[in-house]
Image (cartoon, grey):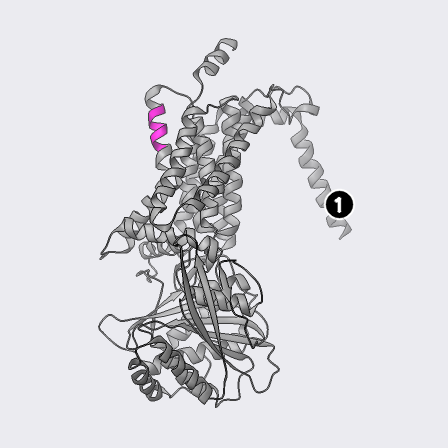
Amino acid sequence: KQWYQRRVRGVIVHKMKILMNRSRAKKFEKLLTSKNPYICALLYIAGVVGIALFADLRVNQNTFVSENALLPGYVVTKYQQHATAASYEREFSQISDDDSKKAWIIQKFQSYGLEVYTQNFTVNRPLRGDKLTGDNIYAIYRAPKVSSTESLVFSTSLKDIQHAVPLMMSLCQLITRQTIWAKDIIFLVSEQEEYGIGAWLQAYHDVITSPHITAAPVLAHSGAIQAALHLDMPVFSFDRLRMFVEAINGQLPDIDLVVLVRQICRQEKMQLLLHNSPHDLGDFGGNLLGLHANMAWQASGGIHFPSALYHPYNIHAVGIRTENSYRNRYTWQHMGRFTESVLRSVNNLEEQFHTAYYFYLMPCIERFVCLSVYMVPCGLILAACAARVLCLWFKCGYKGETESNMFFTDIEVKVLDCAYPALLAISLGLLNELISKWFTHQNIPYLLATSQLIVITLGVFLKSISDWRLHQAFILLLHVLTLVLLCMLNISLTIFYALPTTLVYMLQFPSNKLVRVLQRLLLLAVNPLVLVVLYTYLYVYLQLDNYQGSVLSDLHSEITSVVESRETLGVWSWSAYAYLLLPVWGLQWTLSFPDERIEEKKKKEE
């Protein structure tokens, strides 16, 4: 150990001597400034190629189960209550009003001896100016041989067409007759979908995540929730399942839970696809399109399925939806065995999910790209931007002659020159946050147009005070820091944002009038709002062959949901746009209008 410490200390000292060596530093500076376009282009192209290779079978890898205690596929299912589920379906479908449906659900839970409770909640939606009210019905099955230290959640939503409720009741009949359970099971039926789930979780954990959600206290608790399965059955006779894994803000559950569901579907011979991606083949083209679709779902950061609300409470959850394409191969028996297998496999866990990956990308249901692989191309793109920053820094006027000042510059820069970009970025973020309070959901386009107009107008009237090289170096450095921050939170959003913006930002430099017009057009094309529109049309073109409807109308609904969810459910996509993406773009936009007098003055001095 002492030898290893001395060795590491010697390597660090050696590297520092190289850095402090004046001749080596001058060679590095000369190489970086003279070959900077080639270095940046090489790093950027290598990063783009590396991202495209995520779809290659030699780069991604097969999914596998890291937690041996799960034993997926080895559970002998006992579900034979398909006739009971069909009978309950006939009863439930004859009930028209919601109050009678709730009473029927409570009566069935009580008939099986479960602890049944109701919870009312109210959600104030500030953007829409209305209120949502509803009731959550939850029943707790106490494991007979343990003391309620751990639990599982099996949830569904109460909607006009929901066949998961009869299936849940038939499973209650089976589970209450068994003594094999090591964890409590919480059956949750929520109204208002994600709002009901969010209100129940907030009350269950006794925290206030949003002042806009008012929920009654939970009257009975179980143990720590280890996992959750949310089931949506718009049809009870189906031929495939869709799985939704993305949680709020682009977070992901432990991949062991995803692989568990996939292997159980394989055992039951049911087709399983990742959300709306139709590509589940292992070829390069299918994997590339599947990767694009899955990353698009994650990049939005929104709530696409009620199971997304569990992750902030450290509960790993997946959502399942049944779909029918006129073949009707599966019905109650298959879905009952599938649900029982998932619950019993997770019931085998001896501790929390912790042994597998939390950060990954999935080209298809069978393959994944782990963190250590996808960070390399992202690092290459960041390195290209960092190389450009160093080149601009050296060209700003670095004239260090001794080792004592080699990492400093003797440029005479006023405090205001350095503070101007930072103050402008902070002001733009605060301004976007303030104006978002003044609009309703019908006026979301006006909100976005106002924020864009303010930034573009500031770019016209505010000129770059300091040397354009120093200003651009600061912007690119801020861009790198933004990407590093987003990379730790939502890798898909980082990739979609970094690919076009990094290239355009590095191409901004003073030139003739025609090139400057082209630079300005490119800069408008990578505006965060324009990128959202372009990526939406690209997704529809590549993924949705038979799309019916208005793209802009659906995009308006999605943006409204994201902006509103910031206040009610904690989605930070709008905050990232307002505080990070748009201010950095606005700073780059001000650089597109350099002060020609300053440039002429510098040329005369040189």
Q: Picture coordinates of residue 138 (x, y %)? A: 48, 77
Q: Is residue 12 above or below residue 239?
A: above
Relative placement, left or right, of 99 versus 358 is left
Residue drawn at x 40%, y 44% as measured from the top left: 49
- Say whether residue 98 is magenta: no
Q: Is residue 70 above or below residue 4?
A: below
Q: Is residue 233 left or right of residue 34?
A: left
Determine if residue 77 is in view: no
* Residue name at image x 37 percent, y 88 percent: 81
Residue holding disc 1: 6
The quarter of the displayed image where residue 209 is located = bottom right
Residue 255 screen position, x and y as percent: 48, 64
Residue at screen point 57% across, 77% down: 222
Side of 534 where 6 appears, left or right: right
Give neighbour class at mark 1: few <14, some 14-19, many 20+ (Cα, 10 Å).
few
Q: Residue furthest top?
A: 604
The disc labelled 1 sits on which kind of residue?
Arg
Residue at point 52%, 21% (across, down): 467
SS at circle 1: helix
Please provide percent x and percent y for residue 504.
40, 34
Q: Is residue 276 above or below residue 401?
A: below
Residue 396: x %, y % from top left: 55, 22
Q: Which region is colored magenta? A: 516-522
